[in-house]
Structures are given as C-alpha cells and as structure tokens.
Amino acid sequence: MKTLIAGFGNIFFRDDGYGCEAARFLARAGLPDGVTVRDFGISGLHVAFEMLAGYDRVILVDAVSRGGAPGTLYAIEPDGVQTNIPPDAHAMQLETVLSLYERLSKDLSADVLPTIAIVGCEPECVDEGMGLSPRVAAAVPATAALIQRLLEPSGGRTPV
C-alpha cells in the first residue's frame, strides 16, 4: 500500500514544529516498503498537491490543540476537521491544506483518493523559539508507535 506520512509545522514556533520532528524520527524508524516520510514544514500547498500523487493512504502529522494535556496524542479522522476554508499560501494550517486538497481532487478529477488520517499532538508552547517542550518531545517516539499501528493491515483501529 502506497503511503505518505507528512510532517507539518513551523520549527520556529516551538511545539508547532512537532510534525517536522516526528517526520525526522519516523524517517529513521525503518518503515514498511511503500511508505514515504516527508517533512513539509510550512509548505502546506505542497502537501495538498503531493496528496494527489496516487497514494492509497496519507497520514498528516501536526501539532493539534484539542484541550488535552501537553504531549497528548490524537488519531483524528479528517471528517472532524473544518475544510471549507479558502486557501491562503501565507497561512496554511492543517484545515487549509485539507480544504485545498478537497478542491484540487475535485477540480482535477483525481483517479485515486487516499484514505486520510491525522496524528496530532497537544502542544504546550507555540511561542517564538526553537525546540520542542519536554512533554511534546517525549511524545515523538510514541507518535512513531502510533503510526506503526496505523500502518498495520487492520488499519490500527486501536483507540488513542
């Protein structure tokens, strides 16, 4: 199964760089054949286009505020994410990427539409600065374990 794991975020805003750090960790983790890991950083426009490249599955990895304790991991179905947001190349949040992807896939009549999952981590600090907070940094290896479960043939339907 052709899979894209896309790290997403801004490393210059502390925990917002979680998706980038998780992608770097996963790239060294020995994933199954057919799995591509990329750190897209703040290039949300590129993520939306890459999602149209014939993948069967896409896992987006990003810092996601949902009110939990910092470092809490979430496996999110994209149907719970608002996607009617107009694209703005200067503010490509996860919701904007998904909205743009939906429009592109319809406009281009994409042949293959991947199954999409989001792996998110509750941030502690998204102030200007570099480096993840200790609790978010500690969640990166657990992120790899969660994604390994999602890559299992059963789809890793284990609740998080």
Image: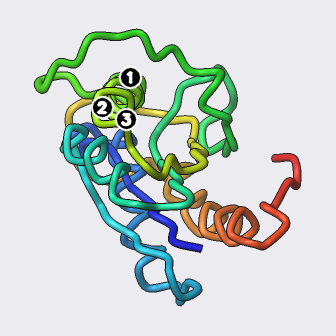
Q: In the picture, residue 107 is in which quadrant?
A: top left
Instruction: Indicate the amino acid at tag 1.
Output: Ser
> How would you rate the neighbour count of disc 1 (Cα within 10 Å): few for under 14, some for 14-19, many for 20 or more?
some
Instruction: Indicate the amino acid at tag 3.
Output: Ser
Mark 2 = which residue?
Answer: 104
Measured as percent of width and height from the top left, residue 86 is found at: 26, 11
Whole-number angstrom distance, CA of label 3 to CA of label 1? 10 Å
Mark 1 = which residue?
Answer: 99
> How would you rate the neighbour count of disc 2 (Cα within 10 Å): few for under 14, some for 14-19, many for 20 or more?
some
**Which of the two discs, 2 and 1, sits closer to the camera?**
2
Left or right for 159, reference 25: right
Residue contact between numbered discs 2 and 3, judged by CB atoms under 8 Å: yes
Q: Residue at x 50, y 81 (%)?
A: 34
Mark 3 = which residue?
Answer: 105
Q: In this view, does 21 lie above or below 112?
A: below
Q: Residue at x 38, y 22 (%)?
A: 99
Q: In this view, does 62 lie above or below 150?
A: above
Towards the viewer: 146 or 82: 82
